[in-house]
Structures are given as structure tokens and as C-alpha cells.
Image (tube, rainbow, N blue to C red):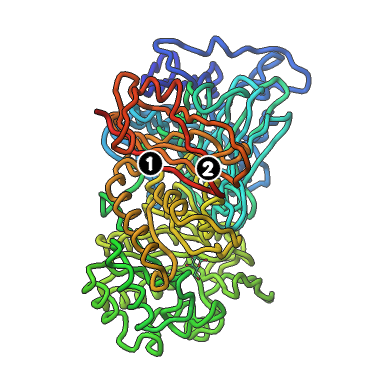
Amino acid sequence: MIVLDRQRGLFTLHTRSTTYQMKVDDRGVLLHTYYGGRVDGADLSYLIREADRGFSPNPGEAGHCRTYSLDTLPQEYSTCGVGDFRLPSLELVHADGSRVADLRCVGCELREGKYALEGLPAFHGAGGETLAVFLRDETARVEVELLYGVFEEYDLITRAARIVNRGESAVRLCRAASLCLDLPRGDLDLITFDGRHVMERCPARAALRPGVQSVGSVRGTSSHQHNPFVVLCESDAGEDHGLCWGAMLLYSGNFEAAAERSQFERSRLVMGIHPYHFCYTLAPGEGFTTPEAAMVCSASGFARMSQLFHRAIRERLLRDNRPGRKPVLVNSWEATYFDFDEEKLLALARASAPLGVELFVLDDGWFGTRNNDRGGLGDWWVNREKLPGGLGSLARAVNALGMEFGLWIEPEMVSEDSRLYREHPDWVLCAPGRAYTRGRSQLVLDFTRREVRDDIYGALGQVLSGANITYLKWDMNRSLSEVWSAALPPERQGEVFHRYVLGVYDMLERFRRDYPHILIEGCSGGGGRFDGGMLYYTPQIWCSDNTDAVDRLRIQYGTSFCYPACTMGAHVSAVPNETNRRVTPLETRGVVAMSGVLGYEMDLTRITGEEGRAIAGQIRRYKACWDLVAEGDYYRLSSPFDGGPYTAWAHVARDRRRALVSVVTGATFAAPPFMALRLKGLDPALRYRVNGEAAYSGAALMAAGYPLPMPQGDYQSLQLLLEAE
Ligand code: GLA
């Protein structure tokens, strides 16, 4: 619910349990007054205080009033050059070289339904409301429209800003954040989700220190290294208690999330496109729209915050053209790498179908001269030496086994050893007169250019029309360098990073529109582009190239703080694991992968009969419980990072009548203690049968716990299906 009190200049956004408020002060500056647990009918600006503070200057019209300074006031969208020295949200360079943005509120508008952003991902759907607040820099005649979307039932508030140049000369935009959040206390912790290739999204938590702490990406993708999702929280906040604010950016390119603890013990969080190499020229009349940011505030800890994000993402962000359970897949990559022919693939398919696998995915190596990762990208036609019958006949054979057929693609890239590169060497991102920096021996196509996108789209269209393909794995395997486009003038080169992302979104949208029957899974060397932007186009993303079950516990745990299990591609692979050589039991690999979109990525032609029966059993179990994984509430019961003897988590049905609890123990040790696992989210008044056997009350299972068996051997697992009697 949005409450507008125009007379007092008070704008209040209420969700079911939270309130967000801003107020226009006497000078027209838009101040942030509150974001926290729900408060009805109050003007919370009484909390804002003014004082004469040294070196906090006073704007011109304040005259000699020394107590009014933007340096000390909580800003709704911070600016630059007018006396607020904290993190700016907006930085403008005017035609005369000055860098001042003095924004005053000139109006607001309540709109029915949630706003959409052209060419950009955004939360959507019925029931939303929009508040637009208009700010204006009168001297430059630059307008900023702050957009707010309110999704009450998810306690979710979305934000974006549109900046329009209404003046007569060009303005350069050097920073345009999506979110600015000024909180009235400095004693908060910041949690970021960091890592590297094959070890993504590990949480890192630290108290805010005075000054700025930031994470971000300048790689052209949201990156393996830092995720565009962060949490600010009270220093004692935990899974079930404490105030926390989660903020995600729906963007798949360079981003920055910066938190500042300022001199007077306030915190400011600013999130948006990274200002590195960002400079957008706004000619008179032109506008720029920031990506969307979304916030959830929870007064009862991280579990609730995550559950709210999960529900909102599932129901209001994913545009799932194939709702329901995702097919259990087998992926050829770790089974064959580049070394395959039709017979080898069909042998894998024949071994997979009887186990209950529903989708056969042909990964890298099927096109052009792609026999290793040094050539072939860009030549999107089938390699007839490997597949003489083409994809059509392979897909038919796979379909005849009762499985769907899917394909790996990497449309944004080109190899120098390819026909595409030989014909269009000027289609890559490169800096004039300089050597290329190669990544995985490949170059990046200039997706800012329509003709480049059209060519790739056309070639892939031919592939899709020649075979019954119902799934695509859209990969992206390097970071961007020498970011320069031959299609833009020098003064617009600071737009290339962003235009590249817009180009990727445009391509994905065309695929979605023209091939609505195709499920697209996102991928960037695993989880290098696992963000809310991609999820708008690809409802599942390959979580990590690391398929080791024990490392995956950490990766999936970190990922779960924002993203729901139904978005995480998770596969069972062979042991020793190809990433870290660890050996884990097949059952444990299954338990971990079942907590995402289950798949198998191993040579199923070489498994024993016993392993085959175990895999068939896993797939049956997954199919029986997928609704819990896909739609249930997620509880982290312990952390794989705290060094405890086990990691446990649960998916609990919304009506609390069923739950799937998973436990994985660590490396074994002698004489382990007796352990009981306390569950969460159950109905205390119900009695639950555990794996069809003994029944316990929800109250007992939550307060006293369930006795865990003594682990025998490394990395054992246990899965409990709880069903109310
Ligand atoms: C990336 C992906 C892998 C696989 C390879 C193929 O690394 O993340 O899953 O598809 O590319 O080259």
C-alpha cells in the first residue's frame, strides 16, 4: 500500500510487515525517514535532527543557518557537489564541466500496477503498485524520476531511477545508482557473497568500519567474485532473529554495492551499475534508465528474508514458460568433453532413459570445428564429422528414447579460428591498435551492435529449426577486456559495458518470444552470471562448474540467501571429482543435487548395476518431493562454514504438512558425539511421520530435535521426508 500525504510531502510505502518512508523537507530535498518493521499512520521525520556540525556546509538558500546540511541529513537519492560528502547516487558532468546535481522534489504520481523497464529485467505481475517521485535540477534541467514498486505479500520493494536531460546541452552521466538507502545507525554488519570460479557466493560478514566498504564487478558480468546481492544487519542478527535488510540488483554486468558508515554513525548503502568505465551521454531530450534493485527487510532474521526473496523471485521475477517440475537432465560435458560421436552420445542417452532421466543435453563441441576450446565459437552449424546425421537425427533418436533434447550454446563469443572471425574480424570488442587479451582462447562479440546480434540469432535460428530442441544452455566463458566498440564515437565508449548487457538481454528476449517452448538455462563458467537479471530470462542457472558435493554445500548455502532452490542447476558427477579430486558417496551427491534442479553429468554407460539402481531411486525420490524443493520454504539448519560436524537444511511445504530435511556430515572422526538436529518451520501441533516410520510432534522436532545416526565414513548423508499424520 502506498500512502501519499501531499500536503506534508510524506510518501509511505507499506508492505505486509514493513514500512518505507520518505519526506520532502521545506527546501524541497527528498529525505529518507525510515525503513523497518511496519509503522502505520506516523510521520517518522521527527527522528531527523539538525545540528551545526563543523565542515558540514550549508546550501545557498539556507543563508547563514548553520544547522541545515546535506552532509548530515538522510538522503533518498544522494547527489554530488552540494555538500553531501558521503556516497553519491548520481554524478553529472554538465557542458561547462561543472559536476553539480542539486535535486529538489517537484511532484509525485501514484500508478496502478507495477512499472516495467524497457529492455531491462524487473519484477512484474498483478497486485503491484507504483510510486513515481520527480526530482529536478533546475539549473541543468535534468529530471530524475524515482520509481518504487510495492509487493505487499512478499515485503518486497523495488526501485529504479530514470534520468532525463530536459536542458539544451548534453549532460554526461558518470554514476546513476539504482538504490540509495540511508539507515540511522552505523553499528551494522555487511554480508557479501564472494568467491571465484568453481567456488562462488560464499558469505563474508563483517561489521561496517568507518568509511566505505564495497564489492562489485568490472568484468562485464556480475561475476563469480562478488554477487549483486548484499545484506545489512544488526550485529547480532542470525537465521531467526534480528533486523536485516537484503538488497539485490537485477543486473548482469558491472555493478557496485557500497556501504558507508559515516561520521555521525549512519549507514548508507548505494547499489547500481559500477561507475568504472561508465559514462553515458544524454543529448537534449535523451534519458537513461537504471537497472532495478529490490529490497526486503526482515525483523526476524535471515531465514525470513531469504524466504521472502525466494517467493518473490519464483512468483514475480521468473517468467517460466514451462511451469512445473523441470526435467531431470543428463549433460554430456563431464561424460565426454569434446570427444564424442553420435554413437557415443546415443549410448549415453540409452543408459540414461531407463533411470528416469527426461532431458538429454548435448554440451560443448557439436558445432563448427570445435574439437577443443581454442576454436569454433561463432560457427553455429553442426559438425558433420562428429554427427553425420546432423542434430535432427540425433534429436529424433533421443526423443524415441522418451527424452527431450537440449543443446549448449555460447552466442556472445567467437574464436579466432572460426569462419565467423575470418569474415568479420571487426565484430569483436577490441581497442584500436592494441593486441587482444584472450580469455579461454576466445574473444567477445560486440553485442552492442544489432547486426552482430542478428547474425548470431539467424545462425542459431537455423539450428533450432533443424531439430526438436526444447532446452538451451546459454554459456558465457570469459570476462570482458579492451571494451571498445567500432560502432560508437569516442565520447560514447563509456556506454559499451552497459549496452553490451542490454544487447544480451535483447537476444534473450527474442529467444523467449520466438521459441516459447524452449527452456533456457543460464551459465557463465558455472555461476559467473548468477543474478536476478539473468533469472528474468533464464529461470534456472548452472550454479557452479564445481560439482563436488561438499564444496556445493557451501556454494548452494551462500546462493540460498537470495536465490530459490528451483533456480540452481545442480548435477551429480563422477568421483574422484574433476575439480578437487574428492570422493563422496553417490547418495550424498544425490542429496545435494536434489536441492536444486537435479541433473547427472557423468558417463552413465560405465556405472554398475547397483549405482544405476541408486540413481533411479534418487530420481524417483526427487520427482516425489520436487514440489517441496521448488515451492517450499527454505531453512538453513546449520552452516557449512562454521566447522560443525554436519550441514543440514530443509524445504518445508507452505502448509507445513510435509518437509524434506537433508543432512550431510563432514570428514569422519572417531567416537562422535550423540547429535540431535532441531528442525524449523514445522507446525508444533502436528505429528509428523519420518520416512514413513515413527511419528514425532512438530513441537518436539523443533524444540528437542531428531536424533542423527552416528556417521560411519566421510561425507555421509541422510534425507528425511516428514509427512503430517
Ligand atoms: C563452461 C560451463 C561448463 C561446460 C563448459 C563447456 O565451463 O560452465 O558447464 O558447458 O563451459 O565448454
At which x and y percent is residue 475?
46, 65
Q: Nearer the viewer, mark 1 or mark 2?
A: 2
Q: In the image, is 303 to the left or to the right of 577?
A: left
Horizontal side of 30 relative to 14 (left or right) equals right
Q: Position of residue 45 (x, y in %)?
A: 53, 13
Element type at marker 2? loop
Q: Indicate left or right for 220 with 520 as reference.
A: right
Looking at the rendered structure, which numbered label has been put on residue 711? 2
Quarter of the image with the N terminus in it: top left
Q: In which quarter of the image is residue 329?
A: bottom left
User: Residue 313, which numbered label?
Assistant: 1
Whether ligand 1 has any atom under 8 Å from the Cβ at mark 2 is answered as: no
| Quadrant where the C terminus is found in the figure | top left
* Mark 2 neighbour class, 10 Å CA radius: few under 14, some 14 to 19, many 20 or more: many
Q: Kindly indicate whether the residue at mark 2 contacts the one at mark 1 (C-beta within 8 angstroms).
A: no
In the rendered structure, the answer to whether residue 591 lies left or right of residue 274 reads left
Residue at the (48%, 57%) spot, across then down: 501
In the image, what residue type sits under mark 1?
Ile
Amino acid residing under circle 2 = Pro
Label whose residue precedes the other's in the sequence (1 or 2): 1
Determine which quarter of the picture holds residue 126: top left
Farthest residue to the front: give it: 671
